[in-house]
Image (cartoon, rainbow, N blue to C red):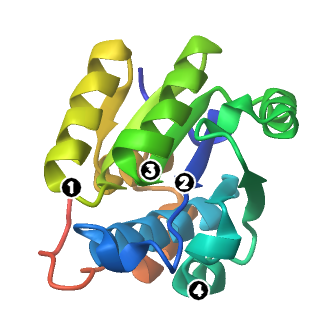
């Protein structure tokens, strides 16, 4: 149950500009997704974003798009992104079996996508610090339900250091210098 960079994909669900102002913890979720997305990009781990009804909810948060230039964007009508045939086929073809999942709303699109991924046999890692809803209680309930269903709750630091695996790799030094610095008002993170 350890994350490996070669089998992982970061999936960011519906962190959309029009929805984020009403999301409890939305700015922090974007910060964490941007930070982990930067680590993923530096390690050549795919980063996928989804959007639900962008005509009404706006497109993906601009900070995400700016910070993650190598992302792949998926538009969806199902709350469960894996129910979209093109998405499901592309994921199956990617060879990635471990999906680090986050976004909004945790109790709707993130959870339903996670359940769909679990049903399809993927390992799902629920990124707790970036899975948010309008009400914190709903995000908490979604996390509990996902864990009971077989997902693993993780933090961004857990994921980053598992992907890095070791400190004597030149990539660790490069990524540590660029990304593993304090974010916002969070404490310094060392292992």
Q: Earlier in the sequence, mark 3 or mark 2?
A: 2
Label 1 to label 2: alpha-carbon separation: 28 Å
For numbered disc 1, what is the local secondary structure?
A: loop
Q: Earlier in the sequence, mark 4 or mark 3?
A: 4
Q: Residue at x 82, y 35 (%)?
A: 94
In the rendered view, tell whether residue 62 sits above or below residue 121.
below
For numbered disc 3, what is the local secondary structure?
A: strand
In the rendered view, tell whether residue 25 sits above or below residue 140.
below
- Circle 2 sits on which residue? 13
The numbered mark at residue 181 is none
Label 3 to label 2: alpha-carbon separation: 6 Å
- Circle 4 sits on which residue? 62
The numbered mark at residue 102 is 3
Label 4 to label 3: alpha-carbon separation: 17 Å
In the rendered view, tell whether residue 10 sits above or below residue 68.
above
Mark 3–mark 2 CB contact (< 8 Å)? yes
Q: Nearer the viewer, residue 174 or 99?
A: 99
- Give how far across and how far down residue 146 sits, in percent: 34, 26
- Circle 1 sits on which residue? 191
Label 4 to label 1: alpha-carbon separation: 31 Å
Mark 2–mark 4 CB contact (< 8 Å)? no
Q: Earlier in the sequence, mark 4 or mark 1?
A: 4
Q: Nearer the viewer, residue 148 or 51?
A: 51
Specify the quadrant that holds the N terminus.
Answer: top left
Residue 16 in the figure: left or right of residue 45: left
Q: Earlier in the sequence, mark 1 or mark 2?
A: 2
Label 1 to label 3: alpha-carbon separation: 23 Å
Callout in the foreground (1, 2): 2
Mark 1–mark 3 CB contact (< 8 Å)? no
Quarter-of-image position of residue 86:
top right
């Amino acid at each position: 149950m350890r994350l490996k960079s070669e089998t992982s994909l970061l999936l960011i669900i519906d962190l959309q500009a029009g929805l984020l102002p009403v999301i409890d913890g939305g700015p922090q979720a974007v910060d964490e997704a941007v930070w982990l997305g930067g680590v993923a990009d530096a390690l050549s781990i795919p980063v996928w974003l989804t959007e639900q009804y962008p005509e009404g909810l706006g497109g993906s948060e601009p900070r995400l798009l700016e910070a993650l230039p190598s992302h792949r964007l998926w538009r969806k009508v199902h709350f469960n992104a894996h129910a979209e045939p093109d998405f499901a086929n592309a994921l199956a073809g990617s060879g990635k079996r471990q999906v680090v999942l986050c976004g909004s709303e945790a109790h709707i699109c993130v959870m339903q996508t996670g359940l769909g991924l679990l049903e399809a046999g993927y390992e799902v890692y629920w990124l707790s610090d970036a899975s948010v809803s309008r009400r914190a209680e709903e995000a908490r309930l979604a996390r509990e339900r996902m864990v009971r269903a077989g997902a693993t709750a993780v933090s961004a630091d857990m994921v980053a250091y598992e992907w890095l695996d070791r400190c004597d790799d030149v990539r660790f030094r490069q990524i540590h210098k660029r990304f593993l610095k304090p974010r916002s008002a969070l404490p310094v993170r060392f292992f």
